[in-house]
Image (tube, helix red, strand yellow):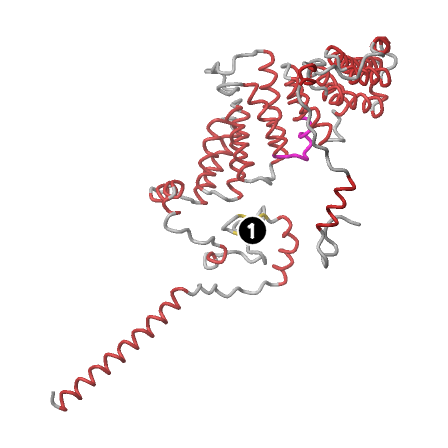
Amino acid sequence: MEPLERTEAHRMVARAHWLILVVTLLASTAGCALWSPKTPPARAALTAEQAQWWADNRDRARYVKGKGYYVAGTSGFFDHEGRRVSTEMGTVLDEPKPGPLENLAPKKLWASTKKAVGQGPNEQVAREHLANGDALFRQKKYVDAAKEYRKAYARWPDSPLEEEAIFKAAESEFFADRYPQAEDEYALLVKKFPSTQYLSQLVERRFAIGRYWEQYDRAHPRFVLQPNLFDKTRPRFDTGGHALKVYERIRMDDPIGPRADDAVMATANAYFLKGRWDDADYHYGLLRSEFPKSEHQYQAHLLGLRCKILRYQGPAYEGAPLDEADEIVAQLLTQFPQELGQERERVKQVQAEINAQRALRGWEMAEYYAKNDYYGAARHYYAKVVEEYPNTKLAEQSRARMEEFKAEPNNPDPPFEWVINMLPRSTKVAPTVQQTNANSNVARLPGMNGFGPPQ
């Protein structure tokens, strides 16, 4: 190759190197800009008046995920310092963008489809539906009002407007006497807004629905799978079961509210009237332990005692219900001396019956051992009956039986003892305690202080 051609080739290679270097620098700069987080726009400082307004209303503000803080009586949302969130600042409060697989979720696809056909979130349209619902509600067209409220909360989800619209839809269904639909709307409200401002109102409505269903089921008992095809006030199946479910939701959604203990007591009474003693006993016990200041404490003790007695199945079964019943008797006599009145004598009779049943359990156990010639164990249980229940008839019978078996051995002769005596006996002798200690001392190695048995 000629020198001139070599020089030209070197120049081309050098140019290529410089071009690669420039492209690399540009790509790295663009990559940094691409991956670096967006810098939020500068925020204007609050005026003294705005700062004071936020300080006065901060406690009333409720955070809405992805939007900011909402203060009742205002429009729009605010950030944590009290600035109104504008469209330019929307990225500050936006949630992280979902990945590609999350966009394929059915919920996301459905939301995208609704948005594509013009049914996506729209606050103005939602407020129009809300206003239409209010107008229909005032005209007592409750079913039509509920439809408008549903359209309202569907068009502006995750907002205070949605909370208001769900509650109003539930109220519309309630006044339309469509209690299953009303209960569904109340449940949706608590699910989406656990600390909703309408909690006290919806608890009262749900309790009224539960009471109506429970009383109807008691007056008109039906098979669980028998459908309800015409009555809009009741669920399709199992009216009584739905009533109990409503009571449970009241207790779970508002555990310290004024209706929580009422719901537990209503549940216990419903089970009691159905003869389901175990379930009734559980809920009476729940009220006694979880609601010590409830007005139902006396009734929960009295009816709980009745459940304990009915749960006990006899001396051949578990005796825990008797022990628990005895505790309730003591609590009744101690904590409710005024409320008992004439019931005091009945409670004392129940206490005597409990002691008689306990004595019978001991007597049956003693008889079992005596029947099998284990007179030592039998005498133990007879003596226990005499000692713990001396004023019962079984105590007198136990004394007579102890005297009858006085000369009997503690344990029966082993079966086939003559065969055992014919067998050769082992000549091995067990090691004594002294031999065991001596062996332990021999096994201890020098220099291993602290190991092995103590001296």
Residue 313 against residue 86 in the figure, above or below: above
In x, y percent, where is residue 127?
47, 41
In x, y percent, where is residue 448?
72, 57
In x, y percent, where is residue 396?
86, 9
* In front of the other: 224 or 173: 224
Q: Residue at x 23, y 79 (%)?
A: 16
Q: Farthest left residue?
A: 2
Residue 259 included in the magenta stretch of the image: yes
316 horizontally vs 224: left or right: right
Residue type beneath disc 1 = Tyr
Residue 256 against residue 321 in the figure, above or below: below
42 horizontally vs 200: left or right: left
Q: Residues within 10 Å of mark 1 (few under 14, many from 20)?
A: many
Numbered range of the magenta stretch: 253-262
Residue 98 against residue 367 in the figure, above or below: below
367 horizontally vs 25: left or right: right
Local secondary structure at mark 1: strand
Residue under label 1, please give it. Answer: 69
Q: Residue at x 63, y 29 (%)?
A: 204
Q: Residue at x 78, y 49 (%)?
A: 454
Residue 19 included in the magenta stretch of the image: no
Q: Residue at x 54, y 36 (%)?
A: 189
